[in-house]
Amino acid sequence: MSATNVAIEYRLAKSGSELDVDAIIDVFRDSGLGAYRPIDDREIIGKMFAHANLVVTAWSGETMIGVARSLSDFCFCTYLSDLAVRRAFQKQGVGRELMKRTQKAGGTATIFLFAAPEAEAYYPRVGFAAGSGFTLSRMQRLR
Ligand SMILES: CC(C)(COP(=O)(O)OP(=O)(O)OC[C@H]1O[C@@H](n2cnc3c(N)ncnc32)[C@H](O)[C@@H]1OP(=O)(O)O)[C@@H](O)C(=O)NCCC(=O)NCCS
């Protein structure tokens, strides 16, 4: 499967609850993002998408080939949690287009994200500035 000469269709949704969980898992796995997401747990992936409120997907025919999953307040901040493009479609502008549409749908919101190790050079390349991010996992206690 390749993007050459194939029209890509983009869809915007205010929830990912309508998406097929197995198709999402397949995109995560095929992109490489699966190494950093709980793709063996359909329930968690389903919840991640059911509770997201800004989801842009890319399609080649009936095959989902890319996804950008965000949580947004549509005015101040959009947290772009997951961006993934199938390997055969990478480096052809799909990731950039998914983020363009995410930014547009977020209105005046700033996009925040954490890069996977393989994508650390990607975000500055498409215009993101590095900041100082912090996380507190559910395994950690506040001191
Ligand atoms: C990272 C990813 C989303 C990028 O999507 P993509 O559709 O391949 O990227 P684009 O085609 O929009 O790339 C835009 C530009 O960045 C470059 N680029 C793409 N991936 C890159 C990477 N990993 N590192 C550095 N530059 C990259 C492209 O060559 C292109 O350059 P150009 O403007 O000179 O043509 C995609 O490769 C992917 O799914 N990777 C695996 C999962 C992952 O790491 N996701 C990010 C999680 S935070």
Image (spheres, rainbow, N blue to C red):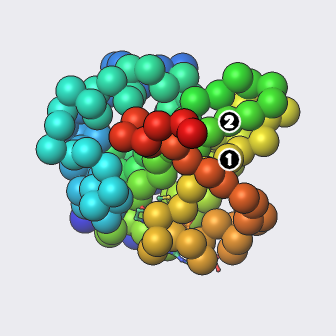
Quadrant of the rendered image containing residue 126: bottom right
Q: Which of these two is toward me, 54 or 114? A: 114
At mark 2, the secondary structure is: strand
Q: Which residue is mark 1?
A: 112
- State the image coordinates of residue 86 (x, y, percent, origin top left): 34, 60
Residue 87 visible in rendering: yes
Task: Indicate the quadrant containing the C terminus: top left, top right, bottom left or bottom right.
Answer: top right
Residue 13 visible in rendering: no
- Residue 19, compared with residue 122, is above or below; it is above
Q: Which mark is residue 59?
A: none
Callout 2: few (<14), some (14-19), or many (20+) C-alpha neighbours within 10 Å?
many
| Residue found at x 81% / y 30% | 76
**Residue 63 as seen in the image, left or right of residue 101:** left
| Residue found at x 47% / y 37% | 141
Dot placed on the residue nearer the N-terminal end, 1 or 2: 2
Task: Indicate the quadrant containing the N terminus: top left, top right, bottom left or bottom right.
Answer: bottom left
Q: Which of these two is toward me, 93 or 3? A: 93
At label 1, the amino acid type is Phe
| Residue found at x 42% / y 54% | 84
Is label 1 in contact with label 2 (beta carbons under 8 Å)?
yes
Q: Which residue occupies the extreme left position in the image?
A: 40
At label 2, the amino acid type is Thr
Callout 1: few (<14), some (14-19), or many (20+) C-alpha neighbours within 10 Å?
some
- State the image coordinates of residue 61 (x, y, percent, origin top left): 32, 44
| Residue found at x 39% / y 65% | 89
- Residue 74, compared with residue 137, is above or below; it is above
At mark 1, the secondary structure is: strand
Q: Which mark is residue 78?
A: 2
